[in-house]
Image (cartoon, rainbow, N blue to C red):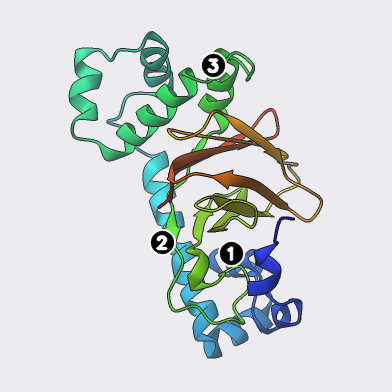
Amino acid sequence: MRTNFWSKTMPKQTLLTHLTPEVIMQTLYGDAPPTAYEHLAICPACQASRQEMRMALVALTQNLFRAPCPSPDELSEAAMQGTASLHIAQHLAKCADCRAEWHMLTHLAQLPLACPSFATLTDALRAHMRVLRATPASAPMPDTAPLRGAQAIAPYLFHTDIADIMIGIAPSDEMPNRYQMQGMLINKTNQRLRNVLLYGTATPVLNSEIDDEALFAFDNLPTGTYNLLISDGETALYLPDIAIA
């Protein structure tokens, strides 16, 4: 039976002691209630979480205004062809952001035919895709901090303007030398993100679904580096380079 380790690391009774991620995000835009700012003034844990979110927003803003970079259309077309033109190749050699997008697009081009076609995915990517950057959660993390997990499961925290996603890894309950990956999605909009694809060098493409408690999971995974694609059919969130070692 699968163990829900979120329930172990985040007791329900402690959720009232800290601001939720949604409220912390509102403080960055000046939309939070006055009591939120009063809490921030005396809570180091929420101050640290707010700083992480602020840094993620800065990185996202920088990513959205990359005027010298090739357009998403150019990168998508080159990825479908499997080769980059000379000027794109020269740009990829010096731009880490475009290299990350190129890595994502070339991986999507290799998805099996049972998945949505690459053309369909790239149409969605051009308008909606967010290239998420993993932000390691602060350590040591207090047990009372909601959505910050525990040191033992080495969580990854991803931010977008659509949702925050936390990924945790723990040893499998069913097989030795295997792991389970559990995710928790904190939706910031009314979009219903449901479908989750996982793919990497060590496994075929696997799929899961986000349940009514905003959780999803994959079991019995070998060590390796994995990528996740979370979508609702129109919007796709890409979470790269989740390592199980």
Checking the image for residue 55, the label placed there is: 2
Checking the image for residue 124, the label placed there is: none
Amino acid on which the number 3 mark rests in the picture: Phe
Q: Is 212 or 132 nearer to us in this picture?
A: 212
| Spot occupied by residue 50 in the image (x, y as percentages of width and height) | 50, 71
Q: Is 151 or 128 nearer to us in this picture?
A: 151
Q: Which circle's residue, 1 or 3, is located before the other in the chain? A: 1
Secondary-structure class at tag 1: helix
| Spot occupied by residue 43 in the image (x, y as percentages of width and height) | 54, 87
Q: Residue at x 39, y 17 (%)?
A: 79
- Please identify the quarter of the rendering in which residue 121 is found: top right
Q: Is residue 26 above or below residue 186?
A: below
Q: Which residue is mark 3?
A: 118
Q: Residue at x 71, y 49 (%)?
A: 189
| Spot occupied by residue 153 in the image (x, y as percentages of width and height) | 52, 65
Secondary-structure class at tag 2: helix
Q: CA distance from mark 1 to mark 3?
A: 33 Å
Residue at the farthest bottom position: 42
Q: Is 24 or 144 nearer to us in this picture?
A: 144
| Spot occupied by residue 207 in the image (x, y as percentages of width and height) | 65, 34
Mark 1 or 3: in front is 3
Checking the image for residue 25, the label placed there is: 1
Q: Specify whether 147 is left or right of 54.
A: right
Q: Residue at x 62, y 20 (%)?
A: 115
Q: Specify whether 77 is left or right of 14.
A: left
